[in-house]
Amino acid sequence: MEPNGMTFRAKQLKLQDADAWNEFYQEYLDPLYGFVYRLVCHKRSVADDLFQDVWLHVIQNIDTYDSEKGELSAWLFGIARRRVALYWRRTLAGKSVDDDNLLRADPADAALLPIEAMEQIERAEVVNSALLVMPENQRRILRQKYIDGMSVAEIAKRSSTTQKAAESLLFRARAKLRSLLGPTFVDALPSHLLNESRRPK
């Protein structure tokens, strides 16, 4: 979605437009569920509960979203990371966490998270930081491909460009990300971070 389109979507969500919310939910249902599912170490029942919990908090806190601070998808996945971090804190440490401060809290307490979840959360933060310094069109196509799960043909159609041009932009975007983070890190991203896989059946 184009930046101005994303801003329009955010406005519609804040107005509690039912169609906008349904479209937003359907677009991120699979990638968001897959993200949560991996962070809870493939515990399906836990992922189901947290997935619903994340959407509840998204709906309740949509007015706090600021488009000048980042894209809507980054805000959405940020809430998911924090809800998962809260789950692990409560599960492994048995400590009470103040929900009112959750949206402003650090994404995770490394001392209380299992290594697998901790590493994925830390990688997500690293990648988000790198994306912020990339050209907007490169950042957008990476999110479309690896977070939204769109094919190159779908990206080209949405961007009103040719498939060859979309492929070229995607190649340059991956090269830019590789130059920022290193080839080994980037090559692991599709399956471990950028949520290319769909919701488990």
Image: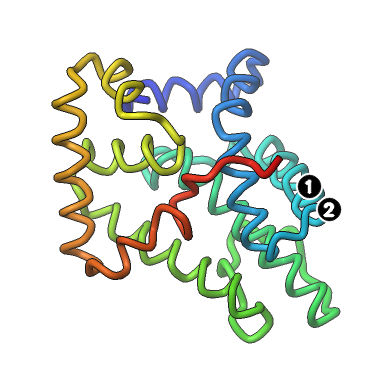
Q: Amino acid at mark 1?
A: Asp
Quick check: 195 above or below 87?
above
Position of residue 153 measured from the top left corner of the image (x, y, whole percent): 31, 22
- Check disc 1 and report the residue beneath it: 48
Position of residue 163 measured from the top left corner of the image (x, y, whole percent): 21, 22
Residue 144 image-quadrant placement: top left
Position of residue 101 measured from the top left corner of the image (x, y, whole percent): 68, 62
Q: Amino acid at mark 2?
A: Ser
> Does dot 1 land on a helix, a strand or a loop?
helix
- Specify how the rendered protein is coloured: rainbow
Question: How many other residues sit within 10 Å of disc 2, few (<14), some (14-19) or many (≥20)?
Answer: few
Residue drawn at point x = 45 percent, y = 35 percent = 149
- Per the rendering, the mark at residue 97 is none
Image quadrant holding the C terminus, namely: top right
Image quadrant holding the N terminus, namely: top left
Residue 164 image-quadrant placement: top left
Q: In the drawing, does residue 152 fall left or right of residue 38?
A: left
Question: How many other residues sit within 10 Å of disc 1, few (<14), some (14-19) or many (≥20)?
Answer: few
Position of residue 166 measured from the top left corner of the image (x, y, whole percent): 20, 29
> Does dot 2 land on a helix, a strand or a loop?
helix
| Cβ–Cβ under 8 Å for marks 2 and 1 | yes
- Per the rendering, the mark at residue 45 is 2
Q: CA distance from mark 2 to mark 1?
A: 5 Å
